[in-house]
Amino acid sequence: MIASISLDLDNKWSYLKSHGDDSWQDYPSFLHTVVPRTLDILQSLDLRITFFIVGQDAVFEENRQVLRSIADAGHEIGNHSFHHEPWLHLYSEAELADEFVRSEAAILDFTGQQTIGFRGPGFSYSPETLLILNERGYLYDASTFPTYLGPLARAYYFMHSSLDRAERQQRKQLFGALSNGFLPLKPYRHKGDAEPLIEIPVTTMPLFKVPIHFSYIMYLATFSRLAAVTYFRTAMRFCKLNRVQPSLLLHPLDFLGRDDEEDLAFFPGMNAASEFKLSLAEQLLSWMDKRFDCVTMLEHADAFDRA
């Protein structure tokens, strides 16, 4: 069974922006720390995954080499929007088109890859987005997050943020609605007149629809590493039993700890040391590599298309 793996390369400024911290406007970055660490682990396991890159990061000259190193290592590059605003669903069609034009151009310039896969920031998702993606020749979208726990995650996020009322209203669909739990776990095609997009959902545990992406596992591991690893392995076994080909999601903070970024302590799991998280990430990826044919998102979409 195949399993696709992807990493949403949200930068430090994007976390601060979503959190309501004005210091994001200085565009602080941790790319030069997290990217080499991630590539080293992937190289040691001979894994190729998909990195969803934010267009704004691809504009800065100082990021050119580190972003290029991702493509040079053979990984697929996906589009993660230009401004990384989780309220992308509020954009007009003209604003969405501009968002994609800018992000595609910046990513192509720095990495040499034309993006044909997209994931909305904060799982932001709308019919208008799908329409623009289809018009621009994208093969797949990966923005759906089938879980009932979106409102709970949003409430936790708001409780630990400094957002004002207007900003909370803007982010009211962050992590999705309760109804997202009824979305499919397996890939499917969106309806449409033209060749419809393939949707590859971020996998949650079959039947229970609880999260299994690495950030959630890292958070559980701060209480018990054994329990977190057991939970993850159980989820993967549920996927096999239910014939769900997993699409696993990683984030930069899965490879960073409190010793790296003290001002991101508001994020769950950031009280752990980087050594602990790197060790756990390598353990889980190695376990996956032994039991699944681990592929990029593009390869996952191609496999669905052929089937």
Image: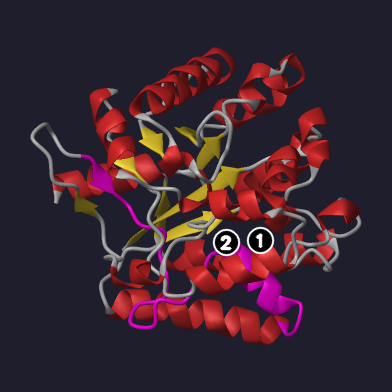
Disc 2 secondary structure class: helix
Callout 1 environment at 10 Å: few (<14), some (14 to 19), or many (20+)? Answer: some
Q: Give the camera-side residue of 166 and 217.
A: 166
In percent of the image, x 33 and y 82: which residue is there? 207
| Residue 63 is one of the magenta-drawn residues | no
Q: Quadrant of residue 95?
A: top left
In percent of the image, x 63 and y 80: which residue is there? 228
In percent of the image, x 35 and y 74: which residue is there? 239
Q: Main secondary structure of the magenta part?
A: loop
Q: Which residue is mark 1?
A: 282
Q: Which residue is mark 2?
A: 285
Percent from the top left, x then y, of residue 79?
Answer: 47, 33
Percent from the top left, x then y, of residue 33?
Answer: 80, 40
Percent from the top left, x then y, of residue 108?
Answer: 50, 17
For marks 2 and 1, give the CA distance.
Answer: 5 Å
In percent of the image, x 50 and y 60: which residue is there? 175
Q: Which residues are magenta?
A: 197-224
Q: Is residue 108 left or right of residue 215?
A: left
